[in-house]
Amino acid sequence: MPRYKLTIEYDGTPFSGWQIQDNAPTVQGALETAVKAICGEDVRVHGAGRTDAGVHARGQVAHCDIAKHFPPGRFRDGLNAHLRPNPIGVLAADIVPDDFEARFSAIKRHYLYRITNTRANLALDISRVWRVPRALDADAMHKAAQRLLGKHDFTTFRDTECQAKSPEKTLDQLDVTREGDAINIVTSARSFLHSQVRSMVGSLVWVGEGRWSADDLFGALAARNRAACGPVAPPDGLYLMRVDY
């Protein structure tokens, strides 16, 4: 029984996240429906990470096992044909060893968060970036972001429904750059807590607005605001860019 590794991109706007749910459209559900249309099997498609409702992906990775052998290119094309008109594209399908696990074999995940710092309303990028109309100091955001690198207790930045056993994570990269009105935040780690990236971005925006200092990111002020549902960036600007193995 061959195991296929799938590299996938999707617009998360119409979906209630990656993970399959009852009575709600999900990316995993759409993929499993496409697989069944090809081979007639009920097959579970395992993803490298669960993205929330509205979160996008340019390099999500998944795997599935099917009884019938298809050439990888044919399997990719068949999936894409059956995925229409869903905004999901299978970029590649590869046959991998049986011990490959999309989630547990991953050694690093890379995310991009896109902000547009403009007062003008959006047209083409609605639901694909976070429009912040207030002036942001991207340099201050970047300097504050460096305080979050390394191994820390990220309880302040986890969702109340996060099921991770430990809040300790090691953050390898958190860079903030500006190009015109665009502010990009790139972050990398082996794994993230539920809503960690969006929580970090929301806090960094407060730094950029001058409401917080870098010291506030791990201080009592941050903990108090997180407990009160403080700054959490919307899902619109978040992209899972790549998963390393």
Image (cartoon, helix red, strand yellow):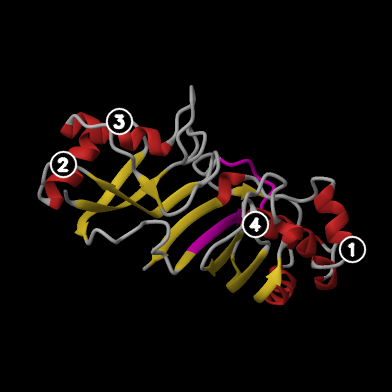
**Which is nearer the N-term, disc 3 or disc 4?**
3
Disc 3 marks which residue? 33
Under circle 1, the secondary element is helix
Alpha carbons under labels 2 and 4: distance apart? 38 Å
**Vertical comparison of 80 with 208: above or below:** above
Type of amino acid under label 1: Ala
Residue 220: which numbered mark, if any? 1
Alpha carbons under labels 3 and 2: distance apart? 16 Å
- Asked if the residue at tag 1 contacts the one at tag 4, i.e. Cβ–Cβ closer than 8 Å, the answer is no
- Asked if the residue at tag 2 contacts the one at tag 3, i.e. Cβ–Cβ closer than 8 Å, the answer is no
Residue 67: which numbered mark, if any? 2
**Residue at image point 76% right, 64% down:** 208
Under circle 4, the secondary element is helix
Going by the image, does 200 lie left or right of 35?
Answer: right
Type of amino acid under label 2: Ala
**Residue at image point 72% right, 55% down:** 202
Alpha carbons under labels 3 and 4: distance apart? 30 Å
Residue 196: which numbered mark, if any? 4
Q: x, y percentage for residue 39?
A: 16, 34
Number of other residues with Cα within 10 Å of mark 1, as a class: few under 14, some 14 to 19, many 20 or more: few
**Which is nearer the N-term, disc 3 or disc 2?**
3
Going by the image, does 28 lie left or right of 131?
Answer: left
Under circle 2, the secondary element is loop
Front in this rendered view, residue 154 or 117: 154
Q: x, y percentage for residue 150?
A: 64, 77
- Asked if the residue at tag 1 contacts the one at tag 3, i.e. Cβ–Cβ closer than 8 Å, the answer is no
Type of amino acid under label 3: Thr
